[in-house]
Amino acid sequence: MSEADGMEDAVDGAMRTGLMVASRIGEQLARMREQEQRTIAAAEEQRARELQERFDAQRAAARAQLAPVSREDWWDKASPEMIERVHETATAWKAYDPEAARAAEKIGEQVQSRYGIDVNNTGADEASVSAALARAQQARTESESERTKSSAARTDEVVARAAIAGANRQDRADRSEPAWDTAERRQQLAQSLEGKGDREAVKARLLADKHQGTHPHAAVATKPTAAKIARMGTASGKGRTLERGGLER
């Protein structure tokens, strides 16, 4: 047997195994589709509508993937991996979509005529199929895990960006407010009081504002507490008592 013949045998064996694995995975996915249909039927109206929309979106994606199998030029260039993927998708959807059923039939015809393999009975070694199926399922699990992590990371990023945007807006708002003890703020106050009330009263208000340069928030922040006032009163009372005591002596 020549080296070329050995290579062809290896490719043939790998394709038989790959097609069988694709069939097994497709059957698993078909059972998932069946469960989805039962869930939709049992769900309440609103929930059923949402589930049906998701199911329809998945079916549309499957149709798009299977569309090329009807073209001869696609088969002329298709790799074994490409054929296995469309076979898996067609197996998963053929019971729920007539387009997928037609694609499954076309795949079977092309694989038989081009490679001499029956997709329903590939003749692959069962041990090789089991090992390849385990690897495929492990890869699928890891892919799902990575998608979950990626989704969580995107959520964290969105939350962080929203927090930063909020902080920036607050900072811009603070900067846009004029400083308290400035000519700009006093000019704004004068404009707001113009035409309101007695002219002398307005002038008196502006004069008082000029001499009171402390922002009201700062004034409140430095206002003595009741406890401090009480202590000051107590100390003052004691001082007066001592003072009277000294005079009496």
Image (spheres, rainbow, N blue to C red):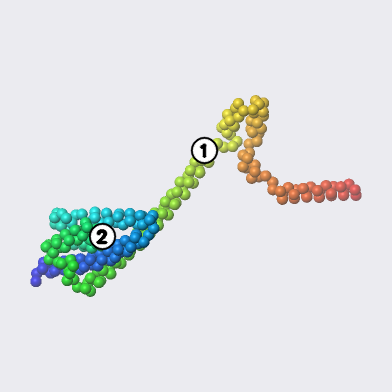
Label 2, label 1: how many angstroms apart (C-alpha)?
Answer: 62 Å
Q: Where is residue 13? Give x, y as percent.
A: 17, 69
The reply to whether residue 223 is in sight is: yes
* Quadrant of the image occupied by residue 94: bottom left
Q: Which mark is residue 96?
A: 2
Residue type for callout 1: Ser
What residue appears at the point 57 percent right and 31 percent down from the top-left corner? 188
Could you say whether the residue bearing mark 2 is in a helix, strand or loop? loop
Q: Which residue is mark 1?
A: 176
Q: Nearer the viewer, residue 54 or 129?
A: 54
Q: Give the quarter of the figure containing the N terminus.
A: bottom left
Q: Nearer the viewer, residue 46 or 81?
A: 46
* Quadrant of the image occupied by residue 139: bottom left
* Dot placed on the residue nearer the N-terminal end, 2 or 1: 2
What residue appears at the point 30 percent right and 67 percent down from the top-left corner? 138
Q: Residue furthest bottom?
A: 127
Local crowd at mark 1 within 10 Å, few (<14), some, or many (≥20)?
few
Task: Name the side, left or right, on which 21 lies relative to 206.
Answer: left
* Quadrant of the image occupied by residue 57: bottom left
Could you say whether the residue bearing mark 1 is in a helix, strand or loop? helix
Q: Nearer the viewer, residue 88 or 12?
A: 88
Local crowd at mark 2 within 10 Å, few (<14), some, or many (≥20)?
some
Residue type for callout 2: Tyr
Q: Which mark is residue 222?
A: none
The reply to whether residue 25 is in sight is: no
- The vertical placement of 12 against 222, above or below, is below
Q: Nearer the viewer, residue 239 or 23?
A: 23
Q: Where is residue 131? Give x, y as percent.
A: 25, 71
